[in-house]
Image (cartoon, rainbow, N blue to C red):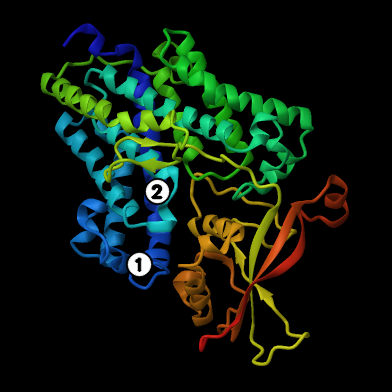
Amino acid sequence: MPDWFHAPDLWIARLVLQRGIGLCYLSAFLVALEQFRPLLGEHGLLPVPRYLARRRFWEAPSVFHLRYSDRLLVAVSLVGILLSLTVVLGLTDSWPVPLTVATWLALWALYLSIVNVGQTFYAFGWESLLLEAGFLAAFLGPAWSAVPAPLLWLFRWLLFRVEFGAGLIKMRGDACWRDLSCLDYHHETQPMPNPLSWYFHHLPKPLHRLEVLGSHFAQLVAPFLLFFPQPIATFAGLFMALTQSWLVLSGNYSWLNFITIILAASALDDSVLGHVLPLERPDMAVVPWHDGLVLAVSALLVVLSYRPARNLFSERQLMNASFDPLRLVNTYGAFGSITRERYEVVVEATNDEHLTPHTEWREYEFRGKPTDPKRRPPQWAPYHLRLDWLMWFAALSPSYAHRWFVPFLEKLLQGDAATLRLLRRNPFPDRPPRVIRAVLYRYRFTTWKERRDTGAWWERTRVSDYLPPMMLTD
């Protein structure tokens, strides 16, 4: 292969990509181990066997087409955790190339099997992003092998689509992105605020305008600079990493921001990363057949990039869409529109058999989403709370929740232990309630004065019934 095919000055970048993507895989499989069964298992809210009965293998490739069982799901998750740890701990660095490739492909195939049957609970961009990045990482090779430059360029192409796709969605979507006012609302109305979101919301409005301008530069200008010579590419990567770090500080977005920061390492050579990670680069060997494999995979991904690239410049741009069932090359985007007011669905229940105006209703409290106004929004990312995230969508419109919300309430009426473990607090620890309902509230962050006077992070106002009282006999 010609000299340009290998990039010895990106040895540390390869290391960062592999370790970082391995950490994201680890988080993803831990989430599946804890949450998949109550949400999607044999007796879950959206059971996988029912879904697979309507899907052919090539519509949703997954090992679970052979047979789904909760035990097999646990086995897949545990194997994924084990393989992730081998990558994160660097055990694969000294392995032969075939074994390294096989380890990464196993990670990709196992997580693809989960995502492709995950339905509504796995219908978000960070799932495809992890799979696409993980597939690319499969062919980077161990630490002793020559760094394949085409793959590092494909990582930059992936980062380009993540950022530029998000920027175009914004400019084509809500007018507040164009008049720079979106962040007047976003920190308060985002799906799952974190401990610092209240403070970000109360930043001066001129600073919010600067935040939006920084976002536009990171998503509409910097992506093109990734393909310029150094040090311009390094500047672009660092600026993207900075804006993504700002998002990490201001909200909970699963591993989306973390993996985007990791992808930015593909633009940074060892002269930059070496200041943070002063590692000694070993002698690297060229493996001819590995180079041939990289060339074939790169050609395949370039061909598959046609539809995602065309989508970027389409007036009907799709957001977070996959164009092939293996999710090898995808399109991304986020927050094309911003909600101005925050609504939350609060689930309440009672043991009273006959309802009166004096009935005592007790609230279920979720792990991450706002319920108790005096509870500070918690930090969860990069771990992802799938039920909490879907509850935000349920508040936007019942159409987002029509398939799973009533089964969820039914599980609470049954006192289902697996479902209750997804919550922070069960107000009926001794026996399940008789009647359950859902109420829609408007939430807003308290002001500085309200915070001092009441100790509350939120002020809420009841809007309407979301779902009327129900019993198991209903």
Identify the residue at image location x=59%, y=72%: 426
User: Is 19 placed above or below 377 here?
Assistant: above
**Mark 2 residue type:** Ala
Q: Quadrant of the N terminus?
A: top left
Is 171 left, or right, of 123 in this rendering? Answer: right
Please rate how many residues cluster around mark 2, counting C-alpha atoms within 10 Å: few if below 14, some from 14 to 19, many from 20: many
Identify the residue at image location x=59%, y=36%: 247
Along the line of sight, the residue nearer the viewer: 60 or 352: 60
User: Is 285 placed above or below 15 here?
Assistant: above
* Mark 2–mark 1 distance (CA, rounded to whole Å): 17 Å
Q: Position of residue 467 (x, y in %)?
A: 61, 74
Identify the residue at image location x=36%, y=26%: 155
Q: Position of residue 89 (x, y in %)?
A: 34, 36
Q: Earlier in the sequence, mark 2 or mark 1?
A: 2
Identify the residue at image location x=23%, y=13%: 5
Under circle 1, the secondary element is loop
- Give the label on residue 41, or none: 1
Q: Position of residue 13 (x, y in %)?
A: 38, 21
User: Is 268 placed above or below 392 here?
Assistant: above
Is 171 left, or right, of 17 in this rendering? Answer: right
- Give the label on residue 384, or none: none
**Mark 1 residue type:** Gly
- Give the label on residue 28, or none: 2
